[in-house]
Image: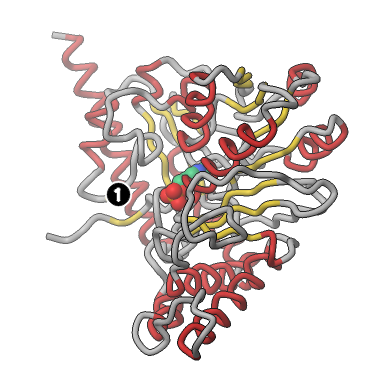
Amino acid sequence: MQKPIYLDNFATTPTDRRVVEAMLPYFTEQFGNPSSVAHAYGWEAEAAVKKSRQTIAAAINAAPEEIIFTSGATEADNLAIKGVAEAYFSKGKHLISCVSEHSAVLDPCKYLQSLGFEITFLPVQQDGLIDLELLLRSIRPETILISVMAANNEIGVLQNLNEIGAIARQHQVLFHTDAAQAIGKIPLDVASMKIDLMSLTAHKIYGPKGIGALYVRKRDPRVRLAPQLHGGGQEQQLRSGTLYTPQIVGFAKAIELALGEMESESKRAIGLRQMLQNKLSQLENIYFNGHPELRLPGSLSVSVAGVDGAALLLGVRSTVAVSSGSACASSSIKPSHVLTALGHSPELARASIRFGIGRFNTAAEIERVAKTTIAVIESLRSAKATAVNF
Ligand SMILES: *Cc1c(COP(=O)(O)O)cnc(C)c1O
């Protein structure tokens, strides 16, 4: 069986072979525990971790000691949100987030609600952006954290981090951003954007799964955080557990490659996306979700009126690997919470495809995907029209 064309690059990406090459020695020859200070095996691993930490910190204009390695963005989000709540509850028990966040942010927030914290979930406007005036009005004296994602994993919309950071700083509220989809794809700068906590992951940018990081600001202001894992005291007591050297090396390599190729790759992905959008635009009653420009380069989310969502996905799936909403939600029949937040009916939200164009996709692939998608939609619509006529 020939596998379908992979256009689900916002769910995960293949690990770049150059990343795998960089990782390999750390499984075998240089296998030491970076915390083993007594011998050369430990020193080698420690040196690799140190270098990787520097690369990752530099990518977001942070200091190396502000990078805390985690198992991915889910753990980083949990550490940021629950860690701040636990460290600052005596100052206040109010947090602000947003309805279109990833479940790795929404669910820790809901968990905090069950413990007596109050959470304001900001709505999004039709273009997927939050209303900054509303954010401003939602801040209270007891607000301790604003958590708004950098780039949305379903519709690719880029929130205005500069403005949100400025508002948060002005009101002395900590600002956390989930940048799982943004790192390596758009420029990020924790200093100019006034970001206090940032969640990262490797596997959305051609790095390995199971590794990520939380950026934690050390000065102006120094962020306090309650650890969520207790044990050996690694990562400045904030995240216990033996450091996963090969994954950390791979994470840094993935970031290095993504930054080096960001400009050219971004242009290429926008070109392919535009091509797909132009072709799909020949269909009537098809909606392109999210802000037309403030969007990740390879992201195209479409909603198709007048077709059944399940039939649509079934129709395209032998040609192209995509999902309707986020990967985590797609196994359920519930419509995407992001698309309904944009104002779509549940039916329209279900009849949606998230195309995520990535590093290894070609123009020929996009041609084929467009052709199949159009054919499937036309046949579903004509079948429906026939059924109504009889
Ligand atoms: C993928 C993703 C996550 C989860 O990251 P993991 O590293 O898989 O835990 C969190 N937030 C966003 C926006 C994502 O796209």
Q: Is residue 147 visible?
A: yes
Given residues 219 and 1, the one toward you in this image is: 219
Q: Residues within 10 Å of mark 1 (few under 14, many from 20)?
A: some
Image location of residue 28, percent across then percent down = 34, 85
Give the quadrant of residue 385: top left
Q: Which element carries disc 1, helix, strand or loop?
A: strand
Given residues 272 and 310, the one toward you in this image is: 310
Q: Is residue 37 above or below residue 375?
A: below
Q: Is residue 206 above or below residue 383?
A: below
Q: Is residue 182 left or right of residue 246?
A: right
Image location of residue 356, percent across then percent down = 44, 49
Image location of residue 190, percent across then percent down = 75, 53
Query: In this figure, which residue is indicated by the disc labeled 1?
Result: 321
Image location of residue 132, percent across then percent down = 76, 26
Q: Is residue 277 visible?
A: no
Q: Residue at x 74, y 52 (%)?
A: 217
Quadrant containing the C terminus in the rendered view: top left
Give the quadrant of residue 170: top right
Q: Amino acid at mark 1?
A: Ala
Q: Residue at x 79, y 46 (%)?
A: 194
Q: Is residue 318 left or right of residue 329?
A: left
Quadrant containing the N terminus in the rendered view: bottom left
Q: Residue at x 70, y 44 (%)?
A: 224
Given residues 347 and 197, the one toward you in this image is: 197
